[in-house]
Amino acid sequence: MKAILLLFLSAVTALAQSQFDLKSPDGKVLLQLRSSPSNLVYEISRNGKTVIEPSRFSISLDGKPLTGALKFEAASGATQTYPTRGVHTIATNRWNGRTLSCDSFSLELRAFNDGVAFRYKIPAATQPRTPDESTQFTLPAESLVWRHGLGGHYEDVYKMSLVEQFAPGEWAAPPMTIQLPRGQGYAVITEAALANFSGMALQYETNRAFTLALGHKHPISYPFRLRYSNDIDRVSMPASIVGEIVSPWRVIIISSDLNGLVNSDLISNLSPPPDPKLFPDGLNTSWIKPGRAVWKYLDGGANTFDDMKRFSAWAGELGFEYNILEGFWSRWTNEQLKELADYSRRRGVGLWLWRHSKELRTPEAREEFFARLEKVGAVGAKIDFFDHEHKEIIDLYQALLEGAAKHHLMVNFHGANKPAGESRTFPNELNREAVRGMEASRLKERAAHNTTLPFTRFIAGPADYTPVHFGARRGDTTATHQIATAVVFTEPLLTYGAHPTNLLNSPALPLLKTIPATWDETRVLAPSSIGNLALYARRSGTTWYLAVLNGPTARKISIPLDFLPKKKLTITELREDSKLTEKKRKPARSLNLDLPAGGGYLARFSEK
């Protein structure tokens, strides 16, 4: 009788709880999900090693948890390639997927060779409804974590610690990078396809678990900016949505090494492709052109019409494509702006004009601004000061990108939140700041900062760091390190912080002038280490660049050069003596460097 009872209880348990497994196309990444009417738990592993320990999946609607017995729908999957920009030119999108559904919501799951993503959908209704979420991400013991705490609204300095050293309630802004224990690789937690929803951040609970928190719960680090919001009170209130509710994708990128993290296409793979009505040739639409820019803000110059002419002339002399003007341009007439745009265009230079987002909160204001830029001949808008990640601001980003596209204008967002794949859907977005960049004059420990960012913030997408400065802003880094950041940092609008005359007078000018804004191929080389050393080999056409950023400790390293063709090349080198050398020879099998603290190295290997 007892045996029959145990068999009956086991059968009841099996009916009440189901386990679903989803594997990546190569079979290495495994997502396991255990579902019951009142509970949903997932875990993730790679090659049998844990990446995310059992963690709850939790959503609510109008303050009530959504539950139900989930059932599998048909399996799905895709294998495709498409053009991309920045790290490399062709993205690969290959995944296996399943959807689980019940009456109240559905859950989409995807497993890629380099990670996992999931999102939920709630069927449409006519009345506004308010979703919320408290999904967990529980890390393995002894994981190392790099994060910043939303200071300055995505402009804080990353810190590294063991996950066990977090304090309950501590914040982490995505992307959060994790080095898994015992050499098991790396992971990054972030989001993709953020639209019609509030942005996410992570808050530490206890027992190595982080909880997803939507924008209304985030700490606001710049409260004085909130006077520009339409309604201050709404910043701390959950956002309501009309119609179908579709969350952004919750993304866990997984890789055995740093090269895999940097080359992951997961965020753009999960984001919608461009609308052909706005972008008839997608990423290659004719008026969207990545390039390099001069900028009068950090290194001297006058806020005058005549000096901006000089800046455009210097940009032309450097071979740069753009001149970015801050808000002082608004004092000038349309006739003056057109004169400057025409003058610049004759030198192969386009104008970008700055605007505060507070002035673009209505459709009428956006149309007037973008129409004016198009009329005077500007090519792009630099839009600044986005207070938070509440849905109203996420909606504003989308409206600005769409409005700019209708007038064939590119966009660079400043004072912004993390990128989440917007530059795939709206390829007119070239950069998004969301980084403690060269504007931060008090950041003296740049060596550690600059060797951390390539494997943390830049994993989410391009950042407008405005690199290269030869004055006090460079902190504890050398001039060679500074120039090498122009290669390591991914910025399709590569805006130099140094005054153009300081670039023109640099001994490295012949090399500096050739650095492109986008790359055909990127390889992160050993012994790169987060916060210590960044070694990048990047290819443009048939030309390779090797850039090294050293952290705060002097070191000797040996770099294999097996990425280079085995034939005679013109090798142009910039070492720590700031002297540029050029030789034509076959490359050695490896390169030995003796790097000072905060030092760097840069070389170009050309077949010409």
Image (cartoon, rainbow, N blue to C red):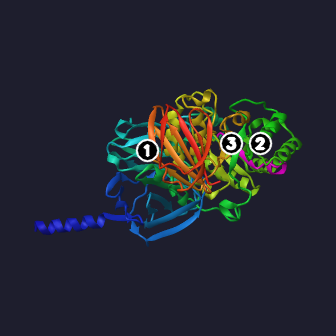
Residue count near mark 1 (Cα–Cα under 10 Å), binned few <14, some 14–19, many ≥20: few
Q: Is residue 377 magenta?
A: yes
Q: Earlier in the sequence, mark 1 or mark 2?
A: 2
| Label 2 Cα crowd, 10 Å radius (few <14 / some 14-19 / many 20+) | some
Please indicate whether residue 543 sits to the left or right of residue 105 in the image. right
Residue that badge 2 annotates: 317
Q: Which residue appears farthest toward the right when viewing the image?
A: 335
* Residues at marks 3 and 1, CA–CA distance in whole angstroms: 29 Å
Q: Residue at x 69, y 36 (%)?
A: 503
Q: In the picture, which quadrant includes the N terminus?
A: bottom left
Labels 3 and 2: the sequence-earlier one: 2
Amino acid type assigned to the residue bearing label 1 in the image: Pro
Q: How many marks?
A: 3
Q: Residue furthest bottom?
A: 74
How many residues crowd mark 3 within 10 Å: few (<14), some (14–19), many (20+)?
few
Observer-nearest of 336 and 558: 558
Q: Residue 213 placed where, x, y %?
A: 47, 45
Q: Which residue is mark 1?
A: 527
Question: Which amino acid type corresponds to the residue marked 3 in the rendered image?
Answer: Pro
* Amino acid type indicated by mark 2: Glu
Q: Which residue is mark 3?
A: 510
- Residue 291 visible in the snapshot: yes
Q: Nearer the viewer, mark 3 or mark 2?
A: 3
Q: Position of residue 188 (x, y in %)?
A: 45, 49
Which region of the structure is painted magenta?
A: 372-385
